[in-house]
Image (tube, rainbow, N blue to C red):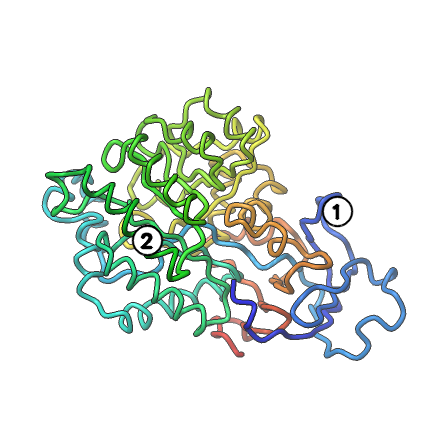
Amino acid sequence: MNSAKPAGALVVRGIGRLLSMAPGAPAEGLRDAVVVIRDGDIEWAGARSDLPAGIGDDLPTLDAGGGLVTPGLVECHTHLVHGGSRSDEFEARAAGTPYEDIARRGGGILRTVAATRAASRAELVETAIPRIRDFLARGVTTIEVKSGYGLDLPSEMKILEAIRDLQAATPADLVPTFLGAHAIPPEAVADRGALVRSIAEEWIPAVAQAGLARFCDVFCETVAFTADEARRILQAGLEHGLRPKIHADQLTACGGAELAARMGAVSADHLDCAPAGSLAGLAAAGTVAVLLPGCMVSLGRTRFPDARPFRAAGIPVAVSTDYNPGSSVTRDLPLMGTFAMAYLGLSLADAWAAVTSSAAAAVGLGDRVGRVAPGFQGDLAIWPGDDPRGPFYTYGGAAPDVVVKRGSVVVRRAVGYPVQGPVS
């Protein structure tokens, strides 16, 4: 995250219910609460009756209007920077054309790769800014952003440089992830070994030297990289200071979850087909399971991943939009909370954790964002009404009235619609 961003100060009063996500805090939230933010960080949070005398008296005040206050949401898995659109592929899938047939016709990931390679860095930034504003308007204040639509070193560097530009141009905190091992580009099909060597020995060192990523991710799947190939790439990332994340076991049980545990991955994402025998290893490694229910909708499938075995094994579960132009074209993270409760088997408390504290852990920021507690960043979402079920109950388009980032108001919704963009 960019600590050089302006830090604000604010006292939030008139809170109907505070859902802090802090350990030991009441799951149903705290009534009549106050939050004090100074120099961008939370100085104090608790019941108004417990507020120490003088705390925050010198700061501007924001009235929450009796609303629900939560941490700013954390979006832990996106492919936000890309060129082109694949809306016709959604129509084709809805009409019964299998994804594999679309890919054989030149569609799928490689179609987005072609459009992204053709786009300039400035064009990638210009098209991504409205997407970030949309996330902010839905209460999302921290966003993980992957590369992966370049699949050659110059194009991957261009995407990561665009993410850096976006970090400076928008209020949200962006967490950059290198996903050069997203798919096998056409020019590398004849020699996969050479591609893996290039990623491990050339691409990763260049990305790390430029300081363009915090994580190294790999799509470990039968249609992408094998577990052995993924291990070599993730090991190279570790050797250059990039922590591992894995797209694991989305389509088949191909060893991705087990590899995530062996590598101590920060997160293992998708996991639709993860075998039960892999869960103990993930729990022991402290890996966060990131489930992506939006993919099921976009791909026209009805078999959602089941979060209950992960929770029973003691594995933190996060959910994400998996925003991308092909298989999950949504930026509605609160809707993923709805899906988490309706289809994945998460409780209300776990659904909130899945878009705040557990999602923060999935991007290595569990000590800075995703909770409303002293020492955490002053990121808040203020929702209409004080019912913590409300944002998930009113599914599809639920939006906070106000979004606060580092103690500054960045989104304020007018009475009624539409949602207004960032105001500072």
Q: Amino acid at mark 1?
A: Ala
Q: Nearer the viewer, residue 161 or 289?
A: 161
Query: Disc 2 marks which residue?
Result: 324
Q: Quadrant of residue 330?
A: bottom left
Q: Is 325 situated above or below 12?
A: above
Mark-to-mark CA distance, 1 and 2? 35 Å
User: Dot 1, crowdedness within 10 Å: few (<14), some or many (≥20)?
Assistant: few
Residue 156: name its quadrant.
Answer: bottom left
Nearest the camera: 127 or 204?
Answer: 204
Q: Return the residue found at the far right.
A: 53
Residue at image x 15%, y 43%? 103
Total marks drawn?
2
Residue 339: x %, y % from top left: 47, 43
Give percent across and percent down for residue 289: 49, 37
Q: Residue at x 24, y 60 (%)?
A: 155
Q: Which mark is residue 25?
A: 1
